[in-house]
Amino acid sequence: MSERLTLPQDPDAAVIGTADRRDRYPVHVCRSERDAVARLLAELDGRRVAVITDHTVARLHGDGLARRLRAAGVDVSLTSFPAGEAHKSVDTATGLLDWLAGTRLVRRDVVVAVGGGVVIDTVGWVASAYMRGVPYINVPTTLLADVDAALGGKVAVDHPTAKNLIGAFYQPKAVVTNVGYLATLDRRQLRAGLAEAIKKGVIASPELFELIELKHTDILAADPDTLARLVHGASAIKCRLIAKDPYEEDLRRPLNFGHTIGHAVETVTGYGPVLHGEAVAFGMACAARIAERRGLLSVSALDRIIGLLTAVGLPTTLAELPARLDAERTIAAMGQIRKIRDGLIRFVLPVELGETVIADDVTDDEIRSSLTTDCPCPH
């Protein structure tokens, strides 16, 4: 039975602490860039910095952040790469390693990743490889990165065979989140990030799920107080979940809910047309349907999960995905994942809000049926 987790009562009260048995690091959730820069400066402690972002975030936040650090006396190098999942690649990582080799960065200096999930994942892997590992700090700028990608040290780049095929576990020195950055996101990006928060509600926290049910309109309107409460709560829950198994020694992980199908969707559609959060939302809907058809999940609970995804504007059927998806190619892509994972595909199936089970006997027919359902709910 999954442990149900409650939300912190005051999102401004404390820094979130990780309980990683090898590496402990703080997670600062700030409401302004001024506060975020102050926290970042304290974590840097006078070291040289290599700021890496993408071209879009450089214009919105990265250039300004670098200026503020320089104004505080920090020696800063800055670079960026093209935005988008298509650039979460070995080629991008190799280019960044070449760039780092031309800077004055040494082993105790710090790489700062500023951006969404693509930047966080790519730069984290680069930091893990450069000089056999240099410290890095995540400064997430999207809701998805705030509540998921920036936390846990799962760093990787994609490969045509599978998403995140080439990577490592390498924990950040710190995470400094500024929810003020979320005001620059469009609604599609906010929705995609909200998918990862909904996931945490389903697998571990009915309280978080209920918060999103009640406040999703305010979240999508980028209300700062609601965003601060959401990000702090979802971040705290993820930190508590990953503390139990930070290096995935046990592959039966509830945090993979929605990702088994979601990653295959991203692979088949070419890493880009379907945002990660959109693919995960679709994967959650499929897994929930499988659970309901197996008699594990009540129809009312399924309706609630699908209903919230739909209310937020996330895809739950093939027709709602922003790119055409071939069910058979998706199943074939999951066959590649099966090879990578010792012949098994493990599905996280919800039993009720806050409780899941792991199934390694889900058949292709069950997957096919869940993929091709043409209406959001079963009735």
Image: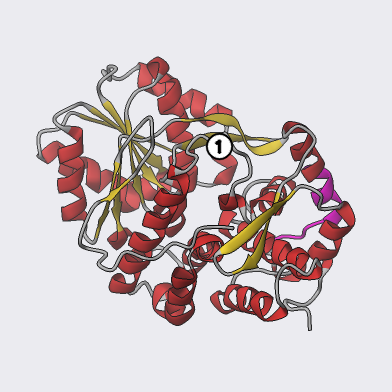
- For image coordinates 33% across by 53% down, the residue present is 60
Q: Is residue 375 above or below residue 20?
A: below
Give the position of the N terminus as an image quadrant: bottom right
Amino acid type at mark 1: Glu
Q: Could you tell me which secondary element the residue under label 1 belongs to?
A: loop
Q: Is residue 186 left or right of residue 351?
A: left
| Quarter location, residue 142 | bottom left
Q: Residue at x 38, y 29 (%)?
A: 22
Residue 51 colored magenta? no
Q: Which segment is the magenta one?
A: 323-333
**Quadrant where the C terminus is found in the figure:** bottom right
Q: Position of residue 91 (x, y in %)?
A: 56, 27
* Nearest to the observer: residue 167 or residue 3: 3
Type of colouring: secondary structure
Quick one: 201 or 298, which is closer to the camera? Answer: 298
- How many C-alpha atoms fall within 10 Å of the one at disc 1: few (<14), some, or many (≥20)? few
Position above or below: 179 against 25? below
On the image, the x and y values in percent for residue 32 come to 21, 59
> What residue appears at the point 32 percent right and 27 percent down from the top-left corner?
135
Q: Quadrant of residue 26?
A: top left
Residue 242 % position (x, y) = 46, 45
Give the overall secondary structure of the magenta segment: helix
Residue extending furthest toward the bottom? 379
Along the line of sight, the residue nearer the viewer: 97 or 171: 171
The residue where tag 1 is placed is 248
